[in-house]
Amino acid sequence: MSTFDGQLPGTSERAWQECAWLRAAPELETLTGTRLVVLSAHPDDETLGAAGLIGLAADTGLDVHVIVASDGAGSHPRSRTHSPARLAALRKNEVADAMATLAPQATLEFLGLPDGELAAHAGELCTALRRACSGDTVLLAPWAHDRHPDHEACARAARAVVAAEPGIELLEFPIWAWHWAARQELAELDPEAAATRRLTLGAERRERKQAAIACFPSQIQPLSADAGDEAVVGPDSLAYFARDFECFLVITPAGT
């Protein structure tokens, strides 16, 4: 797995807006299932990457089930003001507030797995997905090549379950790839990506997404003025998620 430093400058949102393949991606027209299951590595991934689609699914009557894999306690490992337990409690409340904004009837499931260590808990991830998914499910997960080990662990679990359960549609959303990918066509980096799709967000849905993102002050604002309490998702990264569209990779796992 390649890594990157999210605190260093990355590809600007302006560069992405000028990117031909991203502008030309076909629209994600409909959701084929009656149930949307979202596997989020950390409390906020689901909102940054897929708030618009979650809101659309809820508004059109789909049963929405959001599984938050990690407790999020590792977001500020150098903080002297917030213990891991305090961070975990904050982040649990934040994602609950965000889902109340996007999909008030959604079911939230917290696995409480250790932040940064999801690769060691593949069994628990797969079990939770098998329990939540059925044959008419659309499954969302972070992208398998996002260069964050927890994102990649969630994607591997999602792909394994979909490979074993025909009929489940898998869409993956990038988070950190917007920072490091330097405008590459993301589907070309993934042998199991069948296509890229855009979901256009109208003004009302875009406003709801921004309201949901604002529910995560522990991530988008400094915890304090102390070193180690800096915002995890700074203004440059937030610009990726203020777009009038979301981007999804349609995944066909090997063996399906």
Image: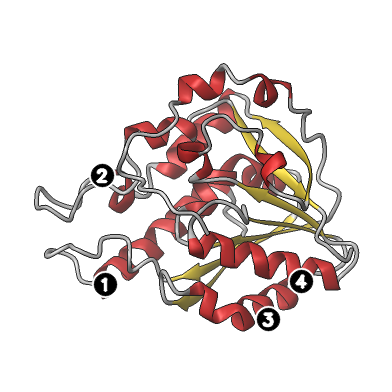
| First in residue order: circle 1 vs circle 3 | 1
Task: Kindly indicate whether the residue at mark 4 contacts the one at mark 2 (C-beta within 8 angstroms).
Answer: no
Mark 2 burial class by Cα count in 10 Å: few <14, some 14-19, many 20+ = some
Q: Which residue is at the far front?
A: 2
Q: Answer left or right for 16 relative to 87.
A: right
Most foreground residue, 61 or 125: 125
**For the residues carrying marks 2 and 4, which lies nearer the camera in this image?**
4
Residue matched to label 1: 84
Task: Kindly indicate whether the residue at mark 3 contacts the one at mark 2 (C-beta within 8 angstroms).
Answer: no
Q: Label 2 vs label 1: CA separation?
A: 17 Å
Q: Secondary structure at mark 4?
A: helix
Give the residue type at disc 1: Pro
Which residue does the image show at 31% across and 49% down from the upper left? Answer: 232
Which residue does the image show at 45% across and 30% down from the upper left? Answer: 11
Give the residue type at disc 2: Gln
Which residue does the image show at 12% across and 65% down from the upper left? Answer: 80
Q: Label 2 vs label 3: CA separation?
A: 34 Å
Residue matched to label 3: 127
Most foreground residue, 150 or 106: 150
Q: Secondary structure at mark 2?
A: loop
In the rendered image, residue 180, in percent from the top left (x then y), is placed at 47, 39
Task: Kindly indicate whether the residue at mark 3 contacts the one at mark 4 (C-beta within 8 angstroms).
Answer: no
Q: Answer left or right for 136 relative to 148.
A: right
- Quarter of the rendering containing residue 189: top right
Q: Answer left or right for 123 relative to 230.
A: right
| First in residue order: circle 2 vs circle 4 | 4
Residue 221, numbered label: 2
Residue matched to label 4: 161
Task: Kindly indicate whether the residue at mark 1 contacts the one at mark 2 (C-beta within 8 angstroms).
Answer: no
